[in-house]
Image (cartoon, rainbow, N blue to C red):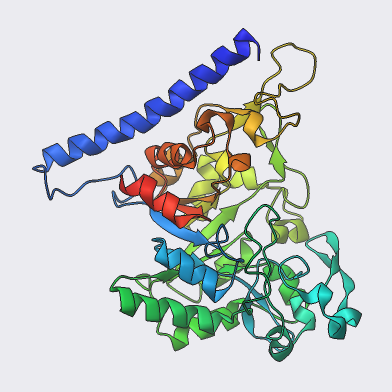
Amino acid sequence: MTRLATQQVTLALAATLAQALALALALALAGCAGGGRGAVVKYPTLDGAKPLIIGHRGAPGYRPDHTLESYRKAIELGADFIEPDLVATRDGVLVARHEPNITETTDVKSRPEFASRKTLKTVDGLEQEGWFVTDFTLAELKTLRAIQPFTDRNQSFNGQFSIPTFDEVLDLARSESARLGRSIGVYPETKHPTWHASQGLRLEDRLLATLARYGYTSRTSPVILQSFEVGNLKYLRGKTQLRLVQLVDADDVNADGSMRLDPPFDRPYDFTVAGDARTFASLLTPEGLKEIRTYADGIGPWKPYLVPSRLLDANNDGQPDDLNGDGQIDIRDRVLLPASDVVKHAHAAGLFVHAYTFRSEPRWLDSDYRGDPMAEYRLFYSLGVDGVFSEFADHARAARDR
């Protein structure tokens, strides 16, 4: 690494540490001002409360995602909410899978009885090949078993766990809340609602009907609903008082730290269908945030919108620098840039901010964190995020509660 690159990395790391130390100082002062031991500590969140820890797909760092065992593990590790992504079976039952395409998250491709179900479908403008939940009844889906899609994670649980229904997830959260004496919330995402509607399987009314059976209809219910689309959130707002969250995506991050907004990840898909030119980035402007507040209670932005990072080219040869010398260019070679004002503007609009996705393996961490996921959490907590979608709830909790 050149001397210039080293200096840039050092400065960025210093800024990161300064933000984390500022939070520690603020918390210490809050404790002193409140009388020391037993004082109520206020965090730089919208309401001053501790940031929520949301078990992203459960605890997929330890168990195959979107299984009851994954959700149970997240709760064991300290998650305040568990997050099921919801898709619908052919017979209209809501189940937890990350995508309608279950090729990489179940053992379906090794099941000869379902070989003929392999097909091509276009989901939100992308043609995909594989097996899709919408082509299976619940009874058929229940014969499948979940697998770990990340090859660098523990594969020993593959083939052991079934695909849960949304009701089963709600039952788990309720029973664990009673057992532990603390509230375990559920944070469902409606996956590809426009596409599901095109299949004759609207998600929204099925979702609300299920929640109503459990008595979850008010703002104080332990449920938060989320979506990358806008139209279905507005529809839900007209039907429920449950808290709603607008998710914000992008295709990738450019070398200079700007967001890459390539279709179909450039905008909510219902915007694409409607010919609306606004992008996800448009939603995070002060004006966009004010509009979101008319139908939602919070935002769920991808992390780089809050803390961008860039690749270095210290030699000006047009090639990014391999900072860790491993022969490849990835997140570990990126250097943090100053935090954006998204959290500040969102809070000013009255919106809470739940950022995604936090993973602990070094390959997901920018160079400034030096392979330490705790450093990343501390930085985001110092910015005032109100919650984090984490695949390692134990790490998120340890960083927060220290």
User: Residue at position x 71%, y 21% from top?
Assistant: 321
Q: Position of residue 105 (x, y in %)?
A: 71, 67
Tell me if 208 is positioned left or right of 29 in this view. right
Number of marks in the image?
Answer: 0
The quadrant in which the N terminus is found is: top right
Which of the 4 quarters of the picture holds residue 95?
bottom right
Residue 159 placement, left or right of 25: right
Give the image location of residue 350, x and y in percent. Answer: 39, 50
Residue situated furthest top in the rendering: 3
Which corner quadrant of the image does residue 216 belong to?
A: bottom left
> Quick check: 93 above or below 22?
below
Q: Measuring from the top left, give residue 303's x and y in whole percent.
A: 55, 43
In-front residue for pair 210/76: 76
The outermost residue toward the front is 156
Looking at the image, can residue 237 be seen?
no
In the foreground, 354 or 163: 163
Residue 266 location (% of width, % of height): 72, 47
Q: Quadrant of the C terminus?
A: top left
Residue 97 visible within the image? yes
Question: What residue appears at the point 37 percent right and 49 percent down from the top-left corner?
Answer: 398
Give the answer, above or below, for where 69 lies relative to 335: below
**Closer to the camera in the image, 325 or 172:** 325
Side of 214 where 401 appears, left or right = left
Does residue 327 appear left or right of residue 396 in this picture? Answer: right
